[in-house]
Image (cartoon, rainbow, N blue to C red):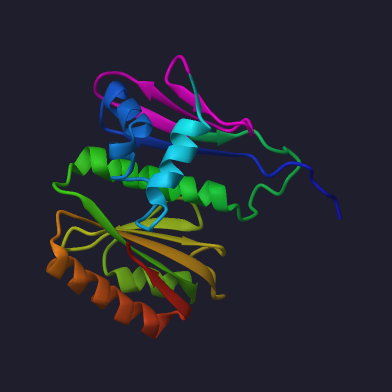
Amino acid sequence: MTEHSEPKPYDVEQPVAAGRDEVWDAVTQPPVLRQWFGWDHDGLDHEIQQIFVDEATLTSPERMGWPDSSFLEVTGDDDRSTVRAVRIGDPAADPVAFDAMEEGWRVFLAQLRFLLEERPEGLRRTVHLTGSARGRGVLALADGEALPLGTRTAQVMTADGQLVLVSGHEPLDSPEAGRIEVVVSTFGLGDDAFAEVRDDWTQRWAALAREAVVTVA
């Protein structure tokens, strides 16, 4: 077996129907980052500060890089932009192997696109689900048309405006169950309305996934 000293490379690209300057602000300003990056948990603000402020080096044109040589860049004009998350990595690594960072960027950049294109009102509140399940079953649970974002990640818009991102260690069309993460993003909900969303997803998730865990802030 060949051992690789570096992780696999990735290049995750997301077009956004928003101007370059607005997108750059969204990836550099912590209050906006909180509206699309990751999911709610007690350490989210610290995570954003560490990744995008303390450890990031900003260069021109709009690019930020990290010590592992990975980088995030924004290109485009006043109307449309492209965001890329890139890691050079080891070219000999298996290109189809699961990589948590790669799939994470697929999820997060889709959440960024939703924020800037749909412009939902109010603060984002999320439900984060983890467990073991088949991808097809999870996508059916989301109850909406799935938009593939690679083989392991997909986006679903529910009828009531929730953005659901599903990401699996196995390809989502695999007949085998594997670890799945789901981020449900809501905007502008009060405590009672959000509690209904949380409880609904908790019940459905417990019925579908093994080792089901639900995280909210």
Q: Please, is residue 173 above or below residue 86 in the view?
A: below
Q: How many marks?
A: 0
Residue 28 appears in the picture as rendered: yes
Q: Position of residue 27 (x, y in %)?
A: 37, 33
Q: Nearer the viewer, residue 41 or 193?
A: 41
Q: Please, is residue 81 above or below residue 205 in the view?
A: above
Q: Position of residue 190 (x, y in %)?
A: 13, 61
Residue 81: in magenta span: yes
Q: Position of residue 4 (x, y in %)?
A: 79, 45
Stretch of the chain drawn in magenta: 59-84
Is 64 situated left or right of 163 in this image?
right
Q: Nearer the viewer, residue 68 or 81?
A: 68
For image coordinates 41% across by 75% down, the residue present is 137
Looking at the image, the residue that sits furthest to the top is 60
Looking at the image, the residue that sits furthest to the right is 1
Residue 133 appears in the picture as rendered: no
Q: Quadrant of the C terminus?
A: bottom left
Q: Position of residue 86 (x, y in %)?
A: 55, 34
